[in-house]
Image (cartoon, grey):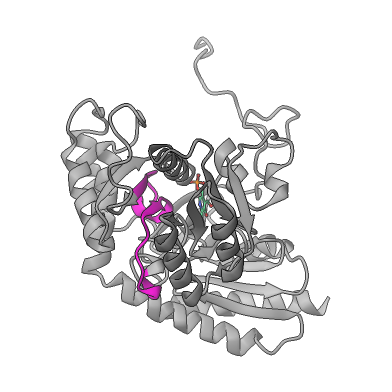
C-alpha cells in the first residue's frame, strides 16, 4: 500500500465548518472551469452566457484565439524580471496608452485600488510641492475606488467603510453632477489639490457623470490649478465605445487610473498622467514588485492590438446600443423599472426595489450578470459580444425581471 501523500491538498468540503478561504465574498455555489468567447462552463458542465466578463475584466472574452498563443509565448520567455531593469514591454504599453489618451507617461501596478492609491499619492505630492501641507482631494457621493484604507476612505459608501475607521483624512465629498458645489469649494477651501471621480460610477449603480459636468470640472480644475483625476478602472479600455469614457466629453484628465479590462484577465493596473502630473513621482517616491511585469505588459499590448484589429470599440458601441435598445423596448415601460442607462457595453437597469436575488436566478437560467447598489442590474459583457449573443442576453434576462416584478 502506498504511503499517504503528506503534500496532497486537503479535500475541500464546501459544507465544512472551517473553510480555508476567508469569507470576504458571498459566493454563488458553483465554480467555472473553462470558457470560449462569451460562454463559460462550470465544473458540472453547465453552460452560461457571460454578460459580466469578471466585472469588466475579460475584454476579449475567454480563451481568445489571438490572446492565448501570445500569452503562452510570453510565459515561455519571461514572466517576471524586476523594476531594477528596463522592461521593454512597459515602454511599448506605455507608449500605446499615451497615444490613445493624448497623455504623457504611465506608472504600472497590478489592480484598480493600486492605481487609485498611486493617483492619490500623486495628488498629495502635487500639493506638497506647492507648499500645501494638508492637501485635500474632492471625492463623490456614491463613488467606489477600492478596498485599501485610502481608497475606501475616498469611496462614498458607508457600508464599505464600516469597521475600518479611522479613515484616511484629506477628502472632501460632494454630490455628483453639481457644478455649484465644486465652485463653492474652490472659493472656500485653499487646501484642495485635486478632483477625483469615475466618469461612470460602476459599483454605485452605472451612474454617469454628465458631459457638461465633466467639461465644467475640467474648467474649474484649470482655473484653480487642481489636478483632474478620472478613475476609468471600470468604464475605461473601450467599454463605452471610446478608448476612455471621458473622451465622449472631449476633455483630457491630468491623471487616469486604469485596471480591469486592460489585461483581458491578467492582473494589471496603471495610472496615465498628463503634463501637469507626469513629473511628480521621482525615484524613491513610489514602487511595486510585480507592477509592470512582462506577462502583464504583454497582456496589455496584445489586448489593445486585438481590440484595434477586430474593431472592438465600434462593436462595443453598436452591440451596446442594440442591447440597451432591446432592454428598453422589453422592460422600459414596466412599472418597477426606473431607468435603463449606460453607454456601450456598460449598462444598468435600475428597478424600484432591491433585486439581488436576480443574480442567482440569472445563473440558474445560464446567464452571468451582477446586481449593484442593491437595485441595479448590471451588464458588462466582453467587448467581443455579437448581436445574436446580445439577443440571447435579453431573452434570458427579460422573463426573470418580469417575473420578479410581478411577485
Ligand atoms: C471605478 C473602480 N475603481 C477601482 C476599483 C478597484 O479595483 P480593484 O478591485 O482591481 O482593486 C473598482 C473595482 O470595482 C472600480 O470599479
Instruction: Say which residue appears at 23% left-offset and 25% top-offset.
Output: 84
Instruction: Say which residue appears at 61% left-offset and 43% top-offset.
Output: 153
Residue 212 shown left or right of residue 180 in the figure: left
Figure check: 66 above or below 191 = below
Where in the figure is residue 83, as x and y percent of width and height?
25, 29
Instruction: Say which residue appears at 25% left-offset and 62% top-offset.
Output: 102
Where in the figure is residue 371, as x and y percent of width and height?
65, 62
Magenta stretch: residue 5 in it? no
Quadrant of the snapshot with the C terminus: bottom right
Magenta stretch: residue 252 in it? yes
**In the image, which residues are magenta?**
247-271
Where in the figure is residue 5, as x and y percent of width and height?
50, 14
Judge whether residue 386 can be spotted in this image.
no
Judge whether residue 376 can be spotted in this image.
yes
Q: In the rendered picture of this protein, how many numbered marks are placed on residues? A: 0
Residue 364 shown left or right of residue 312 in the figure: right
For the residue pair 374 and 106, the one nearer the viewer reads as 106
Figure check: 144 above or below 205 = above
Where in the figure is residue 301, as x and y percent of width and height?
24, 52
For the residue pair 282 and 365, the one nearer the viewer reads as 282
Instruction: Say which residue appears at 51% left-offset and 20% top-offset.
Output: 8
For the residue pair 84 and 227, the one nearer the viewer reads as 227
Amino acid at each position: 500500500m502506498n504511503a499517504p501523500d503528506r503534500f496532497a491538498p486537503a479535500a475541500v468540503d464546501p459544507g465544512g465548518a472551517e473553510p480555508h478561504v476567508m469569507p470576504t465574498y458571498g459566493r454563488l455555489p458553483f465554480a467555472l472551469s473553462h470558457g470560449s468567447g462569451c460562454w463559460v462552463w462550470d465544473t458540472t458542465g453547465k453552460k452560461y452566457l457571460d454578460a459580466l466578463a469578471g466585472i469588466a475584466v475579460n475584454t476579449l472574452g475567454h480563451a481568445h484565439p489571438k490572446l492565448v498563443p501570445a500569452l503562452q509565448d510570453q510565459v515561455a520567455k519571461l514572466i517576471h524580471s524586476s523594476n531594477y531593469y528596463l522592461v521593454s514591454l512597459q515602454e511599448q504599453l506605455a507608449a500605446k496608452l499615451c497615444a490613445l489618451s493624448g497623455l504623457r507617461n504611465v506608472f504600472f501596478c497590478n489592480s484598480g485600488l493600486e492605481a487609485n492609491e498611486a493617483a492619490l499619492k500623486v495628488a498629495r505630492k502635487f500639493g506638497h510641492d506647492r507648499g500645501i501641507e494638508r492637501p485635500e482631494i474632492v471625492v463623490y457621493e456614491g463613488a467606489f475606488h477600492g478596498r485599501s484604507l485610502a481608497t475606501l476612505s475616498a469611496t462614498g459608501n458607508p457600508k464599505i467603510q464600516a469597521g475600518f475607521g479611522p479613515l484616511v483624512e484629506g477628502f472632501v465629498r460632494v454630490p455628483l453632477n453639481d457644478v455649484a458645489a465644486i465652485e463653492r469649494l474652490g472659493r472656500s477651501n485653499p487646501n484642495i489639490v485635486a478632483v477625483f471621480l469615475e466618469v461612470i460610477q460602476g459599483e454605485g449603480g452605472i451612474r454617469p457623470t454628465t458631459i457638461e459636468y465633466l467639461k465644467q470640472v475640467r474648467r474649474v480644475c484649470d482655473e484653480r490649478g487642481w489636478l483632474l483625476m478620472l478613475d476609468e478602472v471600470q468604464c475605461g479600455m473601450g467599454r463605452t465605445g471610446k478608448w476612455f469614457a471621458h473622451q465622449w466629453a472631449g476633455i483630457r484628465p491630468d491623471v487616469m487610473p486604469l485596471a480591469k479590462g486592460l489585461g483581458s484577465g491578467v492582473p494589471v493596473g496603471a495610472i496615465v498622467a498628463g503634463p501637469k502630473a507626469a513629473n511628480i513621482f521621482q525615484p524613491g517616491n513610489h514602487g511595486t514588485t510585480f507592477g509592470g511585469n512582462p506577462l502583464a505588459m504583454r497582456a496589455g499590448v496584445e489586448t489593445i492590438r486585438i481590440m484595434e484589429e477586430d474593431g472592438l470599440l465600434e462593436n462595443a458601441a453598436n452591440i451596446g446600443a442594440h442591447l440597451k435598445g432591446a432592454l428598453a423596448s422589453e422592460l422600459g415601460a414596466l412599472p418597477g423599472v426606473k431607468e435603463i442607462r449606460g453607454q456601450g457595453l456598460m449598462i444598468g437597469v435600475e428597478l424600484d426595489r432591491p433585486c439581488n436575488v436576480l443574480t442567482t436566478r440569472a445563473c440558474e437560467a445560464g446567464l452571468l450578470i451582477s446586481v449593484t447598489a442593491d437595485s441595479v442590474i448590471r451588464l458588462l459583457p466582453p467587448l467581443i459580444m455579437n448581436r445574436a449573443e446580445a439577443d440571447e442576453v435579453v431573452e434570458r434576462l427579460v422573463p426573470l425581471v418580469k417575473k420578479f416584478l410581478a411577485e
